[in-house]
Image (cartoon, rainbow, N blue to C red):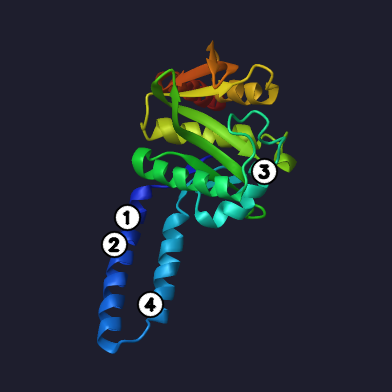
Amino acid sequence: MIKFYNQNKFSHITSAINRTWVNCHRFCKRTQKRCHLTQAVVAGVMHREVLVQICETDRLILRRLSFEDVPALTEILSDPEVMKHSVNGVCDEAATRKFVEWSISCYELYSVGPWALIDKTTSELIGFCSAGPEMVDDVEEINLGYRLARRFWNKGMASEAARAVLNYVFGEKLFNSVIVIIEPEHLASLKVAEKAGFSSFDVLEFHGRLVRLYRLTSEQWEALHNNAMHATSA
């Protein structure tokens, strides 16, 4: 089961931050003292804003990435096996920080991006799953992608996360289609894509690599969702 969160309910947090900073500034100007308590409150509010949850599944929480995730995410993205099929290769801490910065900009510009995957049992960051902008043959597409720490491979979590992301994108009517780009020899990702509902594909060259480009439309997703609902109720 997938639960979704309405991000509009977090809009009051931004207003609270602004009001608190104004009050803090006025108080400090009058008393010429540092407002440690107020600053701590603001920091807590900002922390809650950054960690906005998108949805949750049976085993995972999907939320926005924050700069606090950089150390844990670097550990995952610096693994050569995890990044074997990435066009960018392994990421050190500086590259991971830039990735998180790009992710945050995606949330603001597109309302989607790479979302942190949190193991419900341990509250551990185990990777990310993304619906993010990708230029393909000079056309901007929304691309599904993911990276998981190796110890969480072969547990069905990638498929679980992919379904949640697609449910969110199409359920919120954010985009009409989502693509996924996979190298033919990456069998595990091919299985994840097929389980998520991707079927037909085109073969093209992407960053010097021969890949398959699958596309799933909102209409196809709705049909798959309705079929699954009918099968469950039958």
Q: Secondary structure at mark 3?
A: loop
> CA separation, marks 3 and 1?
35 Å
Q: Quadrant of the N terminus?
A: top right
Q: Amino acid at mark 1?
A: Ser
Disc 2 versus disc 1: distance between alpha carbons? 7 Å
The percent coordinates of residue 89 (x first, y second) are: 63, 34
In the structure shown, which secondary structural element does the residue marked by tag 4 occupy? helix
Where is mark 1, residue-wise?
11
Foreground residue among 179 and 138: 138
The disc, 3 or 2, on the residue closer to the chain's N-terminal end is: 2
Which residue was labeled with disc 2? 15
User: Residue at horizontal 66%, vertical 45%?
Assistant: 76
* Residue, disc 4: 38
Q: Residues within 10 Å of mark 4 (few under 14, many from 20)?
A: some
Q: Circle 3 sits on which residue?
A: 78
**Quarter of the image with the C terminus in it:** top right
**Amino acid type at mark 4:** Thr
Disc 4 and disc 2: Cα gap in Å? 15 Å
